Image (spheres, grey):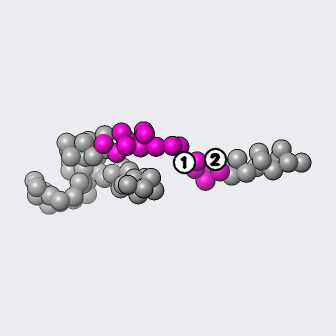
Amino acid sequence: MHTGSLMKRRDALLKCDESFKLSDQSVIPPIASAYIEFKDTPEWKQAYAELKSVLATREHVPSKKERKEIRRQKAKHKR
């Protein structure tokens, strides 16, 4: 899977509510849901652990802020 796709998956997992009790949902979700909704479920923990293990094997991709600093340093050294 592409690193960008993995990062989007990470963002989606991190946006999940901590638990049903702390969420604003009023209807109890079905036990066998196709979606991961809460961080306190074994499915979320497994998905996040698998995601972290895959990302750990990938090269670091600089953030926008890091790329800006790299460009600034290169321009500074060219003077």
Residue 43: horizontal and vertical position, in percent? 21, 46
Rendered position, 36 above or below 41:
below
Q: Residue at x 41, y 43 (%)?
A: 55
In magenta, the rendered stretch is 50-67
Q: Residue at x 15, y 58 (%)?
A: 33
Q: Residue at x 10, y 53 (%)?
A: 31
Rendered position, 76 above or below 28:
above
Q: Amino acid at mark 1?
A: Val
Residue 55 placement, left or right of 37 = right
The disc, 1 or 2, on the residue closer to the chain's N-terminal end is: 1
Given residues 37 and 19, the one toward you in this image is 37
Residue that badge 1 annotates: 61
Q: Check residue 61 for magenta coloring.
A: yes
Q: Residue furthest right?
A: 79
Answer yes or no: is residue 23 visible.
yes
Q: Using the image, tell me which numbered label, if any, was put on residue 72.
A: none
Residue 24 placement: quadrant: bottom left
Q: Name the magenta segment's main secondary structure.
A: helix
Q: Amino acid at mark 2?
A: Glu
Question: In the structure shown, which secondary structural element does the residue marked by tag 2 occupy?
Answer: helix
Residue 61: horizontal and vertical position, in percent? 54, 48
